[in-house]
Every structure is written in structure tokens, then in C-alpha cells.
Amino acid sequence: AQSVTQPDIHITVSEGASLELRCNYSYGATPYLFWYVQSPGQGLQLLLKYFSGDTLVQGIKGFEAEFKRSQSSFNLRKPSVHWSDAAEYFCAVSGSGNTGKLIFGQGTTLQVKP
Amino acid sequence: GAVVSQHPSWVICKSGTSVKIECRSLDFQATTMFWYRQFPKQSLMLMATSNEGSKATYEQGVEKDKFLINHASLTLSTLTVTSAHPEDSSFYICSADGGIGYEQYFGPGTRLTVT
């Protein structure tokens, strides 16, 4: 069965420091992978997605992610974190048969220290 | 563009009553909408897939008679929690299929508290 694992439940980084959020997936075929951010009172916002092609994907707000098939990973990175990046981050994979159904990881809470 | 709204944003109801939550795509048409449930500090769990003009498809373990879903138009899907109980208290989130690249657009969610 398809699954997504985000090993880090909570991460704290200092403002200006680099960030990497980990995501590992289990999927039988080539996955469609997504990173979403959830802020209080707001809907989930898509940061970036990977379908095919270049394994390094650029997203909004300065985020990027790299698809590594050999490691079944799709880690999210940002070179310099801003206080406004504090939020909940979810990695997701599309479901079997690419029906559009998303399977989400457990989420990682990012706290940014001033 | 691609805005999804939910109404109400929060609701408190008494045990045994029913509550309806609306999900609207404001500036695009969505043949498919999804309903998720999110417990505090937890991930989103897909409850059902809603297709315009047809019956919803429920995920395993979701009671279709308790969570009634109607997708009457290309811009509106509703979730009715029938005979609500305290254990139904949760954060309910809908999303709409944008039709391009399997991207989903999410509503802001509805906080349901059953007393």
C-alpha cells in the first residue's frame, strides 16, 4: 500500500538558517509527489510538486525539493528560513492509479527562532 | 485564482443533531472534490471522493450513512454529519481537483465541536 513518512514531527531552526524536511514514500510505480504548507486559519497551500523530468523541483517562497528514486525520498529544502515560514508542512503522494487521491504524511511542525 | 471556500469556518452543535458543511470552488469548476478529516496535531485522512452528479466514494472505515456527501453542481459539494456525537468533533477540510496535474486546491477547513 502507498504510504508517506515524515520522520521529523517537530523541527526548530533559527531565522536565516537552512532547512531540510524529510519525506519518504512507498509507492509501486512512479509517484506524483507534493509538498503542502498549512498555516493556522488557512487552507493547505501547494509549495511544489514532482511528476517527472528534472528531479530538482523549484517551488514558491524559495523552497525546493529533490526527488531521489533510489532512496524513495522527496526532501524539502530552503537555504534561509524566514520567521513567516513557521507552519505545518505535509508531504503527499498521489494514490494508486493516479486517481487524484492524496496520501499525506504525518506532517512536520516548523518553529523558527528569532 | 483557484480559490476554495468552506462554510461555516467553525460550528458547535449538540450531540444528536446534524451539521452541514459547504465546500465551494469560487473561480473554477471542479468535477471532483475530496473531503478530509484532521485530528489535532495529526495528518489529513481522506474520507471520501465526491464527483459531480454521482454518488460519493467513501474510504474504508468511513460510515457513509453518518457522513453524507452531495456534489450537486460543479462548484459545490456538501458534507452532512448526521446524528453527530462528540467523537465526530474534528477539523474537516475539503479540496477541489483543479483538473491540471492532479493538483488539489484546499479550503480553509471547518472546525466542528459536538457537545
Image: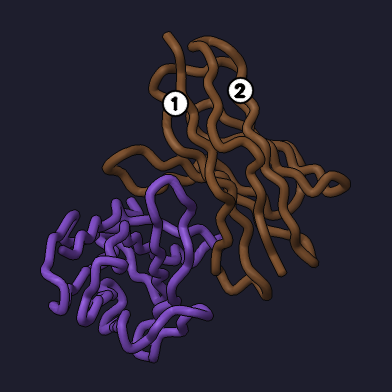
A31 relative to A64, above or below: below
Q: Position of residue A6 (x, y in %)?
A: 63, 43
Q: Which subunit holds the residue at mark 2?
A: A
| Residues at marks 2 and 1 touching, judged by CB atoms closer than 8 Å | yes
Q: Residue at x 59, y 24 (%)?
A: A78
Left or right? Give the position of A93 relative to B106: right
Q: Secondary structure at mark 1?
A: helix
The residue pinned by badge 1 equals: A85
The residue sitting at the right extreme is A70
**One can see residue B14 in this view:** yes
Hey, what amino acid is under mark 1? Answer: Asp
Question: Does residue A57 appear in the picture of this structure?
Answer: no
Pinpoint residue B5: horizontal percent, then vertical percent: 24, 58
Q: Secondary structure at mark 2?
A: strand
Q: Is residue A11 left or right of residue B64?
A: right
Q: Residue B44: percent from the left, percent from the top?
A: 46, 57
Q: Quadrant of residue B69?
A: bottom left
Type of amino acid at the residue the image marks with label 2: Leu
Q: Identify whether B87 is placed above or below A17.
A: below
Q: Residues within 10 Å of mark 1 (few under 14, many from 20)?
A: some
The residue that appears at 70% across and 43% down in the rendered structure is A74
Q: Which residue is at 28% across, 60% downward?
A: B27
Q: Which residue is mark 2?
A: A19
* Colour assignment, chain A: brown
Q: Identify the mark nearer the N-term, 2 or 1.
A: 2
| Above or below: residue A89 compared with residue A3 | above
Chain that bears disc 1:
A
**In the rendered picture, chain B carries what hue?**
purple
Vertical relation: B63 (above or below) A55 = below
Q: How many marks?
A: 2
Of the pair A86 and A82, the residue shown nearer to us: A86
- Looking at the rendered structure, whether the residues under marks 2 and 1 are on a common chain is answered as yes
